[in-house]
Image: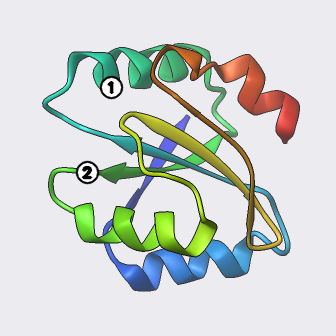
Amino acid sequence: MSWQYLTDTEGWKSILEESHVKIQVVLKHSTRCSISSLAKSRLEKQMSSEDAFYLLDLLQYRSVSNIIAADLGVTHESPQVLIIKNGQCIYHASHSEIAYDEVIKKL
């Protein structure tokens, strides 16, 4: 398992481009929210060493989250997992609906 950290709009543009080749997964995470920490922890417990998902720290990079919401037309929530294919959000979930099994089904 490895998190790739999303920290700027250039990284976001790269994810959108890469999504035309391979489905991308982004977790929007608030380091101050216990529900967000729980969702992140649940994903981490089930992620395999081959999973390479993106992690966006909402407290530090909220402006990036706002751009993502605008680009994808998906209302911002926290925590929130987004699955992106061909530049479009094909699945999103928030709070207790975030589940590794659901993410893997979309990949």
Of pointers 2 and 1, the one earlier in the residue sequence = 1
User: At 58% across and 80% down in the image, what residue appears?
Assistant: 14
Is residue 86 placed above or below 3 in the rendered structure? below
In the picture shown, does residue 60 fall above or below 67?
Answer: above
- Quadrant occupied by the C terminus: top right
Picture coordinates of residue 86 (x, y %)? 83, 71
Q: In what element is the residue under mark 2?
A: loop
Residue at the disc numbered 1: 36
Residue drawn at the location 61% of the way across and 25% of the way down = 47
Q: With 8 as the anchor, is 93 left or right in this view?
A: right
- Residue 46 location, x and y as percent? 61, 16
Task: Using residue 62 as the reference point, say whether residue 45 is left or right of it.
Answer: right
Give left or right: position of 71 versus 85: left
Residue 106: x, y in percent? Answer: 84, 38
Q: Nearer the viewer, residue 37 or 71?
A: 71
Q: Position of residue 12 (x, y in %)?
A: 49, 74
How many tags in the picture?
A: 2
Q: Nearer the viewer, residue 76 or 105?
A: 76
Amino acid type of the residue that numbered disc 1 sits on in the rendered structure: Ser
What is the C-alpha distance between the residues marked 2 and 1? 10 Å
Task: Answer with the quarter of the image where residue 89 lies.
Answer: bottom right
Classify 10 Å Cα crowding around label 2: few (below 14), some (14-19), many (20 and above).
many
Q: Which residue is mark 2?
A: 58
Looking at this view, is 58 or 43 the one in front?
58
Instruction: Classify 10 Å Cα crowding around label 1: few (below 14), some (14-19), many (20 and above).
Output: many
Disc 2 + disc 1, Cβ < 8 Å: yes
The quadrant of the rendering that contains the N terminus is top right
Q: Residue at x 49, y 22 (%)?
A: 44
Identify which amino acid the numbered label 2 is placed on.
Answer: Leu
